Image (cartoon, coloured by chain):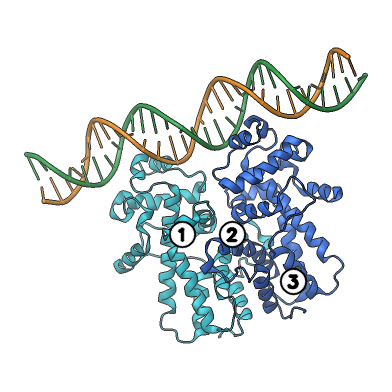
Chain colours: A blue, B cyan, C orange, D green
Amino acid sequence: MDRLMQSLKMGINEKLYVKDPESSSLGKKIIEQGILMIDEVGFESFTFKKLGTKIGSNESSIYRYFENKHKLLLYLASWYWGWTEYKLVFATHGISDSVEKLQKAMEILAQTVEEDESFTHINEVILNKIVINEYSKSYLTKEVDNENKQGYFAIYKRLVDRLSEMIIAVDSEYPYPSSLASMVMEGTLHQFFLKEHFPALTNCNETVTPTEYFTDLIFRTLKAKPNG
Amino acid sequence: MDRLMQSLKMGINEKLYVKDPESSSLGKKIIEQGILMIDEVGFESFTFKKLGTKIGSNESSIYRYFENKHKLLLYLASWYWGWTEYKLVFATHGISDSVEKLQKAMEILAQTVEEDESFTHINEVILNKIVINEYSKSYLTKEVDNENKQGYFAIYKRLVDRLSEMIIAVDSEYPYPSSLASMVMEGTLHQFFLKEHFPALTNCNETVTPTEYFTDLIFRTLKAKPNG
DNA sequence: GCAAATATAATAGTATTACTATCATAATAT
DNA sequence: ATATTATGATAGTAATACTATTATATTTGC
């Protein structure tokens, strides 16, 4: 699984960290416990000082890895989307039927996340919760245009693009493939959030998954029928 | 237009403010200039101290109207959604054809906001920008469940519900009316954001509006054809 | 195995934030 | 004209988001 790690690391923009957290055990601890702590207290209340205390380390040491918590969030999000992209490419590679391929993609993108044994220090289930609850805050800022130029959102954009291509492959006449793709990506996170906090605003629940809802939506929208 | 003002005020949860900002000229100034300032510097950098300086008033005086900036954001959002609900009800009232009604609703909900002369101290165009850029932050918090119980999101929820009802009226067989409605509401804000900052991730642009995209989407999804 | 380089920890310090408290003064209502 | 209420001015606190400096570990190269 080292190769996967490598490719994930490669995808993450180097400007997001001062020192690569994968290069030391302290760095890994920052990531591991940072994920747990952001989930526990929420991004607003999360501070490097508290994290330092939790991992028995010093605030100033954490600053040697990340400029600030915003960059850490961007790093975690990049990791998450890189991991998702890997799963997507792996699962859809070699599927020639475009409908089946899109169906598989929806499964990967809108399904409930399960733990991946490959990365011992990263809890993907909790990282997914962070993405659901905090990802929007990483781009809803005054610095978004500059940070976009720096390439901080590159992996996410590539993912949207991949989905968009799969949509076009199913229905080349459909006029809004990019909007549909970005809506599915963002909408999935939103539906998971609603399921948890505003159940009256969604039909997703214990039995109906976002995958079902969005797969149904996408195949109603495109002039195609899902297989099976 | 006093009656409209009354009904909008009525809709806003009283626990969101300490003293009703509509009840004094200082209160109105807080709202008016608060909107401009949040738009200018972004919600994170916005502080009551800066706002006090800007309106030639005192930080402590602003605290007599709002407990904190989070509550102010919730207040502004409630106002915005109350105003939107009013427009929706007004525009769709009396339309008996369910397809036409839904079409009209989509126009109201996904269209670019234009200024409303009725409220001199509130710039609706800028408030709409704030909702696009900051609304998510009002519920992506650790306090969301408690604040939801307090009714801080009631107007928004009612709006989603209204849209959901209109969807059911067009296609009572459709299995995900709530998810579709909440997705349209949230997705509209997102598509406006993408148009501005990530144009490659959307097909909305100068000529294609979110209204067009979402109207097309909704009528492809429901087994119905839009009129006209 | 030791020196040099590097990483981490400890401590201190700064400007700003997000408030709370108190008191003074201005405006308004009776 | 007085009492009430609203606003302003000032001060103070704990926490945040850092930066800087110095000390102490740890690793690495020879």
Q: Crowding near pointer 1: few (<14 within 10 Å), some, many (20+)?
A: some
Q: Which mark is residue B148?
A: 1
Q: Are marks 1 and 3 on the same chain?
A: no
* Residue at which label 2 appears: B193
* Foreground disc of the pair 1, 3: 1
Callout 1: residue from which chain? B
Q: Can you say whether A222 is above or below A146 in the image?
A: below
Q: Position of residue A158 (x, y in %)?
A: 75, 58
Labels 2 and 3 touching (C-beta < 8 A): no
Q: Secondary structure at mark 1?
A: helix
Is residue A53 left or right of A173 when viewed as pictured? left
Q: Secondary structure at mark 2?
A: helix
Q: Mark 3 = which residue? A: A167
Q: Amino acid at mark 1?
A: Asn
At x 71% / y 63%, what residue is drawn? A109
Subunit under mark 2: B
Q: CA distance from mark 1 to mark 3?
A: 37 Å
Give the residue at x 80% y 51%: A118
Q: Are marks 2 and 1 on the same chain?
A: yes
Calculate the distance from the C-alpha at mark 2 to the C-alpha at mark 3.
Answer: 22 Å
Decide: few, some or many residues near mark 2? Use Cα within 10 Å; few <14, some 14-19, many ≥20: some
Q: Which corner quadrant of the image does residue B76 belong to?
A: bottom left
Q: Give the residue at x 56% y 61%.
A: A196
Q: Earlier in the sequence, mark 2 or mark 1?
A: 1
Q: Element under label 3?
A: helix
**Image coordinates for residue A138, horizontal then vertical, percent:** 62, 50
At which x and y percent is residue B128?
Answer: 49, 60
